[in-house]
């Protein structure tokens, strides 16, 4: 039995609210979500703080394969678009 799933979004932007994930699982969940994106798709990341260590890990893991664009950044948190290239 085969099953064809099409979990794409017309806008190719998928929300990811890290605040709802236990801190010990966040990085694994983020990497899993980014690994699931295809080139041209974007994960809109929301967090309660600026994830600078995570950004360094993303650059080490994906290099130029992911672009990082801040949409919102202040003391309340961040919204960042991670786009697969």
Image (cartoon, grey):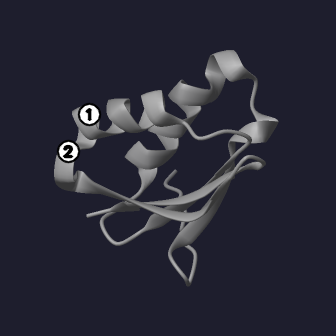
Q: Which residue is mark 1?
A: 61
Question: Compared with residue 19, is residue 44 higher up or lower down, i.e. above or below?
Answer: below
Give the residue drawn at x 34%, y 72%.
40
Query: Real-space Cα distance between discs 1 and 2?
Result: 6 Å
Front-lying residue, 71 or 41: 71
For residue 75, side relative to residue 60 (left or right): right
Marks 1 and 2: CB-CB under 8 Å? yes
Q: Quadrant of residue 84?
A: bottom left
For residue 47, side relative to residue 57 (left or right): right
Q: Quadrant of residue 59?
A: top left
Give the residue drawn at x 47%, y 65%.
42
Give the residue drawn at x 25%, y 42%.
62
Q: Could you tell me residue 10's position as x and y percent?
A: 56, 84
Dot 2 surroundings within 10 Å: few (below 14), some, or many (20 or more)? few
Q: Residue furthest front?
A: 75
Q: Could you tell me residue 68's position as x and y percent?
A: 39, 57
Dot 1 surroundings within 10 Å: few (below 14), some, or many (20 or more)? few
Q: Could you tell me residue 75's position as x and y percent?
A: 73, 46
Q: Which residue is mark 2?
A: 63
Q: Residue furthest top?
A: 24
Q: Is residue 62 visible?
A: yes
Question: Compared with residue 85, is residue 31 higher up or lower down, i.e. above or below?
Answer: above
- Which type of secondary structure does the marked residue at label 1 adopt? helix
């Amino acid at each position: 039995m085969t099953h064809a799933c099409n979990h794409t979004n017309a806008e190719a932007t998928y929300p990811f609210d890290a605040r709802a994930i236990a801190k010990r699982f966040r990085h694994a969940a983020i990497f899993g979500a980014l690994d699931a994106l295809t080139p041209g798709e974007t994960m809109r990341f929301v967090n309660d703080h600026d994830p600078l260590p995570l950004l360094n890990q993303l650059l080490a893991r994906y290099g130029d394969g992911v672009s990082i664009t801040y949409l919102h950044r202040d003391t309340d948190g961040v919204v960042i678009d991670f786009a697969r290239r």
